[in-house]
Amino acid sequence: KVIVIDYGSQYNQLITRRIRHKNVFVEVVSPTAPIELTKDLKAIILSGGPSSVYEEGAPRLSEAIINSGLPILGICYGMQLIAQYFGSRVEKGVVREYGKNEITLLKEDVLFKGLSKVQTVFMSHSDHVTDVIEPLDLLSTSAYANAIIKHTSKPIYGLQFHPEVTHSVEGEQLIENFLFEVAKIQPDWNIEDFITNKVSEIKDVVKDQHVILGLSGGVDSTVCAALLHKAIGNQLVCIFVDTGLLRKHEAIEVLKNYEVFKDLNIIKVDAKEQFYQALKGVKDPEEKRKIIGRVFFEVFEQEKEKHNYASFLAQGTIYPDVIESLSTNGGKTTIKSHHNVGGLPKQSTFKILEPLRELFKDEVRKVGFELNLDETLVNRHPFPGPGLGVRILGEIDESRVKILQEADDVFITLLRKHQLYEKVSQAFCVLLPVKSVGVMGDNRTYENVLAIRSVDTTDFMTATFSRLPFEFLEEVATTIINKVEGINRVVYDITSKPPGTIEWE
Ligand code: XMP
């Protein structure tokens, strides 16, 4: 495997995905985590990041990494760390290079197999390596900066640009060269092996104990259920919690969807009041997420004794949830606390099982297909664990839930009617804590504003808003305003991710 040391670059997920696509297993780790030099670790990538290497408190490069003897590729900040470590100078540049730039390769190297001498790359830096001294060698320059460096006797490279970004035209080839020519890794990671290994791992860990799984009807928990069921059969109990924050008819639809799983043990728990009570008066998005996560755990704890005192709680946590909850900025900022990654409350007696923790959404779907799950289940739009709780901005109450459920139902029904549901990756409505003036008939209205959101993405880490036809948007807006009492204005969210996130809270 390969590890990416996360110095906080916004492009870390892109690196990871590029590498997975080459059938190589890769994980992102924090710069402060101890590095285990296991036999299967074949290369290390040092990511970019927002800090300056010469600043006090900036994340450092550990001796263990640099002395590991493994091939190392430093990208941007990662390159500057390498340069600094070996005594070259890193300084603030006179010009900040951002966007597409040209670099020229000055020497031959295995890393450059099949690459053009002059090529377009994506840069985003203000600091750069200003002089390259022994034991480092300069392999390429751009108009303003030293673009590629290499250690003269070790397989250690530094790039001032971002090969993982598609604007770096030959970046993919360069990453491939690093993996296969420099590090000589075997591309042997695939979905079938993943399933086989996970099934035996789950059996080893669970033994004869029982597992509770929170089933939401979404693809992640469904695939998780299928995988666990394959491993431990009826030692698994799936619990579908009606949080009171579900879509209209969601509970019925979800349970209907699972009828095909004849021997999957599914129990529905009505916990509406518990959730509404806990959320009363709470407006802050992070607090709402944390409360919802906590109440989920409470519900599972309550169910535990009814089910052979299950010792494990399984969750359909996937990789983007883990990353977004941990850091994304060198450990500085949490983007949002995904409710299923918050960790167990201290008093909990469950042990956690997260078999999909290493996978991206599209990989989870592949596992689903491989396990013969029905396409309608696997291709459902994702629905976040906290549900409508993060789509009602501000305080949640039952009447606002009702308004949002109705509006969302109109939007989704129309998407399906116009065969657009499968074309977009995720679509939903958000009820805003804002009222606006309108006129209906001869009367002035003063009602809620509703935002509709639809995005296109493969991995949910980055996304663009869907270019839905105006006529369609018009039909959605008109139908919602006519049918749903409490809404008199509909707006369409045209923000991509980044800078926005997909959900609003
Ligand atoms: P964001 O809003 O972070 O969403 O761009 C990325 C994807 O994750 C879903 N999401 C969640 N899923 N628990 C989940 O299971 C959560 O707490 C959560 N928050 C966001 C979101 O719907 C989108 O598909």
Image (cartoon, grey):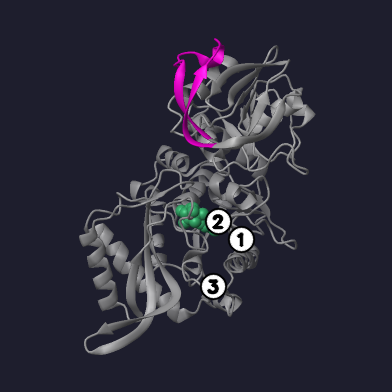
Q: Is residue 374 left or right of residue 268?
A: left
Dots 1, 2 in contact, CB < 8 A = yes
Task: Name the spot of residue 64 as percent of width and height, x first.
Answer: 78, 28
Which numbered dot is residue 271?
Answer: 3
Q: Is residue 196 left or right of residue 351?
A: left
Instruction: Give how far apart the Cα atoms at labels 1 and 2 are.
Output: 7 Å
The tag earlier along the polypeptide, 1 or 3, is 3
Task: Name the spot of residue 196 as percent of width and height, x first.
Answer: 53, 33
Question: Where does label 2 land, which residue?
Answer: 237
Which numbered dot is residue 12?
Answer: none
Pointer 1: residues within 10 angstroms few (<14), some, or many (20+)? some
Vertical comparison of 116 with 429: above or below: above
Please name whichever residue, 210 or 279, is drawn nearer the observer in this view of the structure: 279
The amino acid pointed to by label 1 is His
Please name whichever residue, 387 or 4, is drawn nearer the observer in this view of the structure: 4
Region of the chain picked out in magenta, as a range: 97-123
Magenta region includes residue 119: yes
Task: Name the spot of residue 320 as percent of width and height, x first.
Answer: 54, 47
The amino acid pointed to by label 3 is Ala
Pointer 3: residues within 10 angstroms few (<14), some, or many (20+)? some
* Residue at left offset 62%, top offset 54%: 341
The tag earlier along the polypeptide, 1 or 2, is 2
**Quadrant of image for the N terminus:** top right
Vertical comparison of 318 with 278: above or below: above
Label 1 sits on a secondary structure element that is loop
Instruction: Give how far apart the Cα atoms at labels 1 and 3 are.
Output: 18 Å
Is residue 168 visible in the rendered image? The answer is yes
The image quadrant that residue 185 belongs to is: top right
The tag earlier along the polypeptide, 2 or 3, is 2
Dots 2, 3 in contact, CB < 8 A = no
